[in-house]
Image: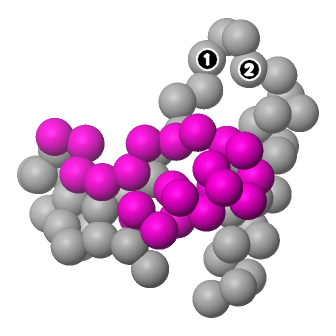
Amino acid sequence: EGSGEVGMALGEEYGISVRSGGHCAPLMHKALGTEKTGAVRFSFSYFNTEEEIDAGIQAVRELAAEE
């Protein structure tokens, strides 16, 4: 799947907002081999709780298990 589909699933199925795509970082994507798929970025901050971070981790695990 591309990063857009993953980002959409996180939003629609889990209520988690993320950024997906190229993130204005073509050299990073070239180095990571994600030029065509992009990446999904979580932007955690001081205001996020440990429970929210754990929920994000669990959501990614569940989506990865579907593959």
Q: In this view, does 23 lie to the left or right of 30?
A: right
Q: Disc 2 versus disc 1: distance between alpha carbons?
A: 6 Å
Q: Outermost residue toward the front? A: 12
Image quadrant in which you'd find residue 1: bottom left
Disc 1 secondary structure class: loop
Disc 2 secondary structure class: loop
Q: Name the residue under label 1.
A: 45
Q: Tell me where the magenta segment starts and ends, as one range.
A: 3-24
Q: Does residue 54 lie above or below 40 as drawn?
A: above
> Which residue is at the front of the view, 49 or 32?
49
Task: Classify 10 Å Cα crowding around label 1: few (below 14), some (14-19), many (20 and above).
Answer: few
> Which residue is at the front of the view, 57 or 15?
15
Which quadrant of the figure contains the C terminus? bottom right
The answer to whether residue 32 of the structure is visible from this angle is: no
Image quadrant in which you'd find residue 66: bottom right
Q: Where is residue 60 in the image (x, y as percent from the top left)?
A: 68, 62
Residue at 76% x, 37% y: name it: 53
Q: Mark 2 points at which residue?
A: 48
The answer to whether residue 61 of the structure is visible from this angle is: yes
